[in-house]
Amino acid sequence: MFKSKKRNFLVSAVLSLSLILAACGGDDDGTTDDGNGDVNGDTTGEDTTETDEGADEAKSPEYHWDFVTEEYQGQVQYEYAAEFARRMAEKSDGRVDITVYEFGGLGDEVDQVEQLQLGFTEFGIVSPGFTGTMVEEAQLFALHFLFPDDVALTQEILDSSEALNVHLREKYEEHNMTPLAYFTEGPMQWTSNGLPLTTPDDFDGFKMRIQQSPLISQSYEVYGADPTPMSWGELYTSLDQGVVDGQENPIFFIEDAGFHEVQDYMTISNHNNYVAMTVVNTDFYNGLPEDIQGMIDETVAELRDWVFDLQDQMNSDLLTAMEESEEHPTEIYNLTEDERQAFRDLAMPVRDFFRENYGDDAGRILDLLEEEIEAARN
């Protein structure tokens, strides 16, 4: 399903972006790939013998951490985590060694959340949909047409929102997980077979693969769809065999995962933004020395622009790749504003359903976020 040429293409894009943004990072790449897709923050494979005992000691890792992701090498989350590991190794003069795991390296998405919560792993990138039964208020990210169509403006809101970075963060910390950052991986689009998804009627009985989130399910039920929770690791085969009829994801992920190979149409709906969270185990983070905490916070801040540019480049390049593919031609349909409005009208009442059913503070957090979004638009 994942072709080496795709990975090579994406890794080349990442390397190019890293060169462009070199001023934000260091001069040397401190990560190494162990052949299994895991990236380590220390440098191996070369002679690092030092005559100075102090230099030897400085290069010996003091901290060994794990960083889990929901994607593969060459995709946004994995490359973010690898860059985080590289910068932390550099800033700490080799004291910090981070192993980055591809999706499936330590279990599926739900397993990874549990491991983070229990402290079996220290860092992770998590989709809020997979934590929605634990932190009910986090399901607000499943609400369609909530964030602006302007992806850069959406990222500004994710960076600065008090609703998310203070109040929602506190909800996660009750479960021993601290969100350090929220970032978009791009607008979500629909794929399908038989016909493009252009009206709510097209969703009648449509088996839509979703993340395991009650509110995502509710969001598609109002269109008349039959939402089907499923790990994305099963999705390619399920689309190919007709177990599900379609799915939603950012463009880069649709192309790189090969979903367009087994789907006839992609509808540019921009109905939502795929938001991921950089998460750290709370007890672990609070127990770190101040200088190491400071390095973590600094690195997270540096990567805000880096990861935005990365997803923007990947989504643009792989949309072009889909449009120009002769081997797997995919018809791309852009919803008109009137067509989007028909979906928006059905989606709006789901916000009230969220306020009434998803946590004691669901209404307060959503109301504040809506105020922040409105202020950002103006």
Image (tube, rainbow, N blue to C red):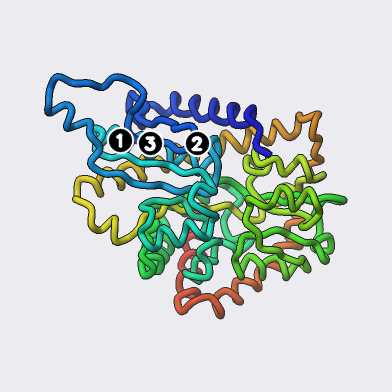
Q: Is residue 69 visible?
A: yes
Q: Earlier in the sequence, mark 3 or mark 1?
A: 3
How crowded is the residue under tag 2: few (<14 C-alpha within 10 Å), some, or many (20+)?
A: few
Would you name the residue on which mark 2 appears? 36
Measuring from the top left, give residue 173's x and y in whole percent.
Answer: 36, 66
Q: Does residue 261 appear left or right of residue 277 in this picture?
A: right
How crowded is the residue under tag 1: few (<14 C-alpha within 10 Å), some, or many (20+)?
A: many
Q: Are marks 3 and 1 in contact (CB under 8 Å)?
A: no
Q: Nearer the viewer, residue 272 or 260?
A: 260
Q: Does residue 310 appear left or right of residue 168 in this picture?
A: right
Q: Is residue 378 visible?
A: no
Nearest to viewer (mark 1 / mark 2): 2
What residue is shown at x 29% (from left), y 19% (from top)?
Answer: 47
What residue is shown at x 33% (from left), y 28% (from top)?
Answer: 43
Q: CA distance from mark 3 to mark 1?
A: 9 Å
Q: Nearer the viewer, residue 338 or 238?
A: 238
- Quadrant location, the N terminus: top right
Q: Earlier in the sequence, mark 1 or mark 2?
A: 2
What residue is shown at x 54% (from left), y 66% (from top)?
Answer: 139
Within the image, what quadrant is residue 174 found in?
Answer: bottom left
Measuring from the top left, give residue 163's x and y in whole percent.
Answer: 42, 64
Nearest to viewer (mark 3 / mark 1): 3
Q: CA distance from mark 1 to mark 2?
A: 20 Å
Within the image, what quadrant is residue 202 found in?
Answer: bottom right
Q: Residue furthest left?
A: 53
| Secondary structure of residue under mark 1 | helix
Would you name the residue on which mark 1 appears? 89
Amino acid type at mark 1: Ala
Would you name the residue on which mark 3 appears? 40
Q: Are marks 3 and 2 in contact (CB under 8 Å)?
A: no
